[in-house]
Amino acid sequence: MMDRSQHSHRNRHEVMATRVALSDGRVVLCLAAICGAIIAGLSGCGGIGPEVPPAPTAAIAVIDAVDAETKEPIAVEAIAICGGVRGTITPAEGSVVLRDVPFGTGTPPVQPLTVTAPGYVTFAELIQISMTVVTFYTVELQPADPELTGTVSGKVTDSATGAPIVSALVRFAHTDVTGTTEVRGYTDAEGGFVVGGIPIGVSRLSAEAPNYVTATDTINVVQDSGGSQNPVVTLKLLPGSTVIDVSGTVVDAFTNAPLSGVRVTLGTSSPVLTDTTGEFAFTGVTVGSQELHASLSGYDDYTAVVEVLPGMARLRVAMTPSAPQPPESPFNVQGTVTLIGATDNSGAVVVAVELATGREWARCTTPASGNYTMFIPPGEYRLTASYGDRSVRRTVTVPGGGRVLSGIDFVLTVQ
């Protein structure tokens, strides 16, 4: 993050600086006040002191965009948003002047900048804002293949009031065999956003802002040649001050019998004990990610991160009896994947995802024998074995205390 007041387009920026100064009323007023004070001093006029111009309350930012490969100005219109202030960079002007950009509360002051143009990947980054002079910033846009990417627009609002949320961060995360590609952008003063250069296919969409609970969704992005063929999306964020009641049950992981007297904590709420039916309840829990902890003599401690949201299902905590011996081998889950129709059992992928958090804890690929092992914390998991476009799932409870869960086998017909 830096104030780029000197770069290859210096001459154009010098001209722009002159135009900004002459067209900004505050700057003209300041110069007039100074000139008036000088004239009054030379003429010997007394009794009237020089006027002190008011301190600036917002910044002016001049944004231009160039092609990252050619370093030349882009030949299409681009949308620029800085600190919620929105404007258009035209090929004729080559830049845009954004006025009344908030300083922000940081030291040094920063604001999010987003630039979107057809045929390019959206640029989004925090930039430093000058409190004394015009801020110049040149954005280098990476070209995007319009046949393989799409553009999505939408709005982010407060779910309680419907008010737009300014400078909310919107992310599009697309995962394929090559890895995960993320394209992001920030909202304007109306809560609107436009993000381009998103790989076509399914992306995980999320929106986040200070003092709000992050909202997530999935979206199938279609090819639109940098246009707007994708549907407009609306994301409603829940204020972080929202509180709800949370309840659940604690059971034995092997017998499903309810456990009484379990000490349960959730976030910053005071601990509670389960009753004879294994039930527990909390009132006034703040929404968002909260850590759940359960402990009972004779059982392994249970810890998980849960998303506290309105309408959430009752929690189910499965605790495993403690075992006296440490692990005898570097794994606690093992099994075999059999591929019917293949020459051997190699190449199957087994993934373990924790049900409570949705977190992927382990991933392994089978050898020719099909045998696999993994080490994951105690808890409830969804194990998925896949080969090509075929997959099969199982839900298992992984015990603690050094015990090994064996015989978690899968059979897939691949031809």
Image: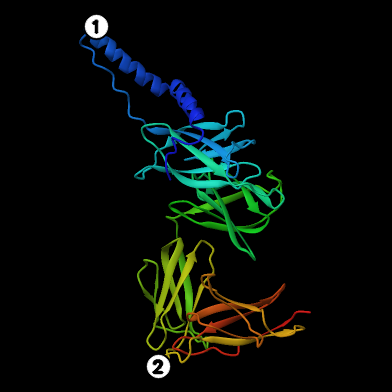
Quarter-wise, where is residue 76 in the image? top right
User: Gap between marks 1 and 2, in whole Å?
Assistant: 97 Å
Q: Identify which residue, 117 or 378, lies in the foreground.
A: 117
Horizontal and vertical percent for residue 26? 39, 23
Q: Nearer the viewer, residue 71 or 306?
A: 71
Residue pictured at 77% horizontal, 83% vertical: 341
Q: Which residue is mark 2?
A: 324
Which element is circle 1 on? helix
Name the mark on residue 43.
1
Q: Amino acid at mark 2?
A: Pro
Does the image show residue 357?
A: yes
Residue type highlighted by circle 1: Ser
The C terminus - image quarter: bottom right
Q: Where is residue 228 drawn, in percent x and y?
A: 68, 44
Q: Is residue 346 left or right of residue 97?
A: right
Along the horizontal axis of the image, is 277 left or right of 407? left
Q: Badge 2, how many Cα within 10 Å: few under 14, some, many 20+?
A: few
Task: Please identify the residue farthest to the right as the structure is shown.
Answer: 415
Front-most of residues 86 and 163: 86
* Percent x, y of residue 363: 57, 76
Specify which label sits upstream in the sequence, 1 or 2: 1
| Residue at figure coordinates x 36%, y 32% from the top left | 132
